Image: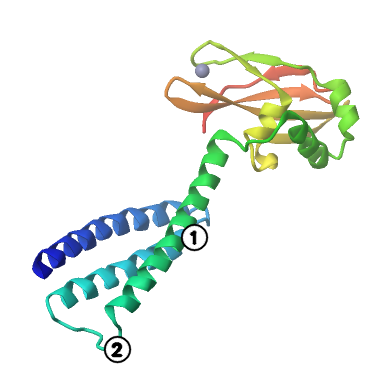
Amino acid sequence: MLFQNAIIVTIGAIILTVGLTFSINIIRILAKYNMARPWILIVFLIAFFFLGYVFTALRFLNINLLPGVTLEGLVTAIFFFGAVFVLLLAFLNRNLFASIFGVGVSDSKAIHMLSDHLKIPVRQIYSMIKPKYSVTCDICKKQVDYTIADIVRSHPRLERGIIVENAMGGVNYRFFVRHYCGKEVREIPVRHDSKFEYRSHGPSRPV
Ligand SMILES: [Zn+2]
């Protein structure tokens, strides 16, 4: 029975090494954007689990690598760090999905965020914006409807989705409208004037 346990734990350790390779791959991708730090912690946790699994498998085979550590002590640590691991992954995924699909804020909260970002009073924004705008996608030729709140929602980092440009007659806003174009998400840059009137749009780009 203990031998079977050792085999199952060893298979678990092999699965962990596959997870480890994926995580190292993610670090390589994110390192370019200086966003790899949480994943380094995840790699450390996986390495800890791996050592724990190896230790446990050997213990089942009556080989005791660390006589000072009991199996109960190790199981307790694995349970605890397992919970930390899940929390960390859930947090990272939440941030990832928020950056792809936008943050779940109401229209009014979105307009307040825009007001803070542009330093324009909320009431003034409401008096200028239209309930809906639309632009045609240059790839699928479909009409893409959007609201100013949609733009705020789809850009957790507002400075990436709303660019203020100083023009001769005041300011222009360049909004990046997110659009699900077939299988990919694209952004269409649209230019609005200082009164939030639509002016023009440029070629879309994949996100
Ligand atoms: Zn399209």
The circle drawn on residue 135 is none
SS label for mark 2 = loop
From the viewer's perspective, is residue 26 above or below residue 162? below
From the viewer's perspective, is residue 193 above or below residue 8? above
Question: Percent from the top left, x then y, of residue 171?
Answer: 83, 30
**Amino acid type for the residue under numbered disc 1:** Pro
Please report the residue visible at 36 percent of the width from the left and 68 percent of the height from the top.
78
Q: Nearer the viewer, residue 35 or 98?
A: 98
From the viewer's perspective, is residue 2 above or below residue 165? below
Lateral position of residue 66 relative to residue 87, left or right? left
Q: Nearer the viewer, residue 128 or 140?
A: 128
The residue at which mark 1 appears reads as 38
Q: Earlier in the sequence, mark 1 or mark 2?
A: 1
Image quarter of residue 129? top right
Work out whether residue 94 can be spotted: yes
Lateral position of residue 157 relative to residue 18, left or right? right
Please report the residue visible at 27 percent of the width from the left and 59 percent of the height from the top.
16
Question: Percent from the top left, x then y, of residue 102?
Answer: 60, 35
Question: Percent from the top left, x then y, of residue 105?
Answer: 68, 35
Please report the residue visible at 9 percent of the width from the left and 66 percent of the height from the top.
1
The circle drawn on residue 68 is 2
SS label for mark 1 = helix
Work out whether residue 168 can be spotted: no
**Amino acid type for the residue under numbered disc 2:** Gly
Q: CA distance from mark 1 to mark 2?
A: 31 Å
Question: Percent from the top left, x then y, of residue 174?
Answer: 71, 29
